[in-house]
Amino acid sequence: MKKRLTYKNIETFVFRLWEREVSEDKISEKENELLKQWKILAEKDLDIAHLKESKERILSGLEHYFPQRNIQSAKSFKAHFYKIAAVIILLLSLGSIFTYTIFIKPDVYLAKSENRTVYLEDGSVVTLLPGAELTVEKSFPASTRVVNLKGDAIFSVAKSKIHPFIVRADGFSTKVLGTVFKISQSGRKKAVDLYEGKVAVSSPGVPVSFLTPNQKWTNFGIAHTTAIVSLKPAKNSPNKVPAILSLSFNDVPLKEVVAVLESSYNTKVLYPKEAEDKKITADFTGGTVSENIESLAFILGLEVQKKENTYILKK
């Protein structure tokens, strides 16, 4: 074929050819070759598991069309069964691509250069920011509403007291019953900003974090690290002032712990070079910057000396 036919242009034509074959009408050599090429094209992206599952779905779904009927050959079909038989042969021979696409293959939504709004079947609305990708299984919405996200997106989740909504992102997940929140993913740095309702954010190696409106969860781009930041509007200003509400580390190198403390509290922390890779496990929830650094020094067995905005940890 010099010109490759698209799925849209060839679907009906291929179906008619298979219908004619079932009824034993003659098919030309050229038409037969076209069917073979379409079969190869249709099957190339399907694996054995998808082929098997699709075939089982088709046969199960069409069983009731043939109650107590012994089919020996295509000739035994009555005229009104020709189309049903054509469907079976078409779907099985084309690698079940139609049922795979309709019943099995997840729906994937991609926002390229602009925002893209996705309306889910449960009434939830997802705004994908440029570069984001949302994957929704065909079973959605099930008892648990689960979607997968790459990149950044804002979720407005339809409320349900019995069917939680879970967003699986890169290395963490966000669970809600109905709320509005934003997920951000930039390299290793992950964040969840909550606007309405409540969410639970879980990440390997750290406790589950529960957010209320105007709060943010982040890992600061460091594994086994979690923090909840309050984002309250400043007086007489449209900007929000961040304040650390909780901060936890689980087996995190000292140099990374210090980097978080310095950026979060706008301060400087000096410590012995030989201790920079020492693993720290600590929960600094509720402490002031001075209290947290005192706690860190205690874990390291060091003393603390403060000079202006600098904390010095030494033996």
Image (tube, rainbow, N blue to C red):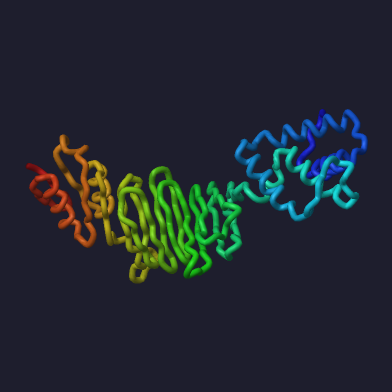
Please report the residue visible at 11 percent of the width from the left and 50 percent of the height from the top: 298
Residue at image location 82% in from the left, 40% down from the top: 14
Left or right of residue 107, residue 71 in this image: right
Q: Residue at x 53, y 67 (%)?
A: 158
- x then y, percent, for residue 175: 43, 59
| Viewer-side residue, 21 vs 138 | 21
For the image shown, how many numbered marks are present on the structure? Answer: 0
User: Is residue 257 toward the left or the right of residue 122 in the image?
Assistant: left
Q: From the viewer's perspective, is residue 195 above or below residue 37?
A: below
Task: List x then y, in percent, for residue 66.
Answer: 79, 52
Where in the figure is residue 22, as x and y percent of width and height?
86, 41
Lateral position of residue 132 relative to residue 74, left or right: left
Task: Give the residue at the far right of this rendering.
Answer: 26
Is 109 or 215 nearer to us in this picture? Answer: 109
Image quarter hosting the N terminus:
top right
Residue 136: image location, x then y, percent:
57, 52
- Given residues 76 and 256, the one toward you in this image is 76
The residue shown at (28%, 50%) is: 263
- Which image quarter holds the C terminus? top left
State which quadrant residue 89 falls in: top right
Q: Which of the two residues, 210 or 256, is positioned nearer the viewer here?
A: 210
